[in-house]
Image: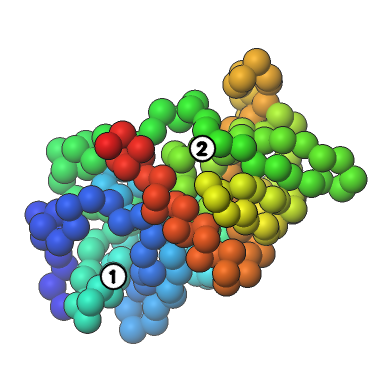
Amino acid sequence: MKLMPADAWLQTYDRPLLNSRVAIADPANPDQEWAFYLRLRLTDSDLATTPLTLSPVAMTTTLIVRDAGVVLRYPVVLEPLTAPIAAWRIRYQGEPDRQEARREWRNDQDRFTGWLRTFETEATEWIATTSYDFSPSALRFFAPWSLAPDTLVVTRWQLDNDRIEGTLRVIRQEPAPLWWNKQQGYATVGEWAHLTEPMRYRWRTYCWRHQPDKARS
């Protein structure tokens, strides 16, 4: 199937998809696919944790989106990231000006909103999350302490008029500390290590409601 150009992408989706079930074709075996959820956007890149077992080198392949019975394919490049888990940066190979036009969908990286209560060992702490990296599988948050990769944190969070409970696994922390709300801590990225299906539905609904563009409207 012919790869879709950037114009076709923009005609199909007038805004970045918050969460989509997509697939990546194995560069060595195009008939083999690995499916996962990903926040699609045309800024510069997306972080996805995938079960791909590939050589740790950058390579080009195809991102596959199945929507309403239509199969869309887009050229992308996979860039491996240094992490204890299989993390890959997926970069859409579209026109630079098209990518630049989508930067409006990003929030300021140092802006954190909302509160997330976590329980680590026997201590109870508070950390803040942000709408910058909301997705069905991961989120970016401010943690007032240092967390090693793969640390599991039990979480309870009040979502509007609902509540979500689950377990987060730390993917990475920025090495340089920062100040937020008169407190020093670290920008942290975590993924949901355990989330029941009802909780996952609540989380995805919350993500959809709190997209950056919706917050400004």
Q: Earlier in the sequence, mark 1 or mark 2?
A: 1
In the picture of the structure, the residue carrying the numbered disc 1 is 65
Residue 73 vertical position relative to residue 164 in the rendered view, above or below: below
Q: Which residue is drawn at the image coordinates 44% and 39% (left, top)? A: 132
Left-right relation of 174 to 74: right
- The crowd level at tag 2 (other Cα within 10 Å; few <14, some 14-19, many 20+) is many
Task: Give residue 108's quadrant in the image.
Answer: top left
Left-right relation of 110 to 141: left
Q: Which residue is drawn at the image coordinates 72% and 35% (left, top)? A: 126
The amino acid on which the numbered mark 1 sits, given as a three-letter code, is Val
Residue 86's x, y, as percent?
57, 60
Residue 54's x, y, as percent?
49, 67
- Between tags 1 and 2, which lies in front? 2
Left-right relation of 87 to 121: left
Q: On the rendered image, what quadrant is the C terminus found in?
A: top left
Residue 126 vertical position relative to residue 6 in the rendered view, above or below: above
Q: Which residue is drawn at the image coordinates 66% and 64% (left, top)? A: 194
In the picture of the structure, the residue carrying the numbered disc 2 is 130
Q: CA distance from mark 1 to mark 2?
A: 27 Å
Residue 103 in view: no
Tag 1's secondary structure?
strand
Residue 78's x, y, as percent?
39, 57
The amino acid on which the numbered mark 2 sits, given as a three-letter code, is Thr
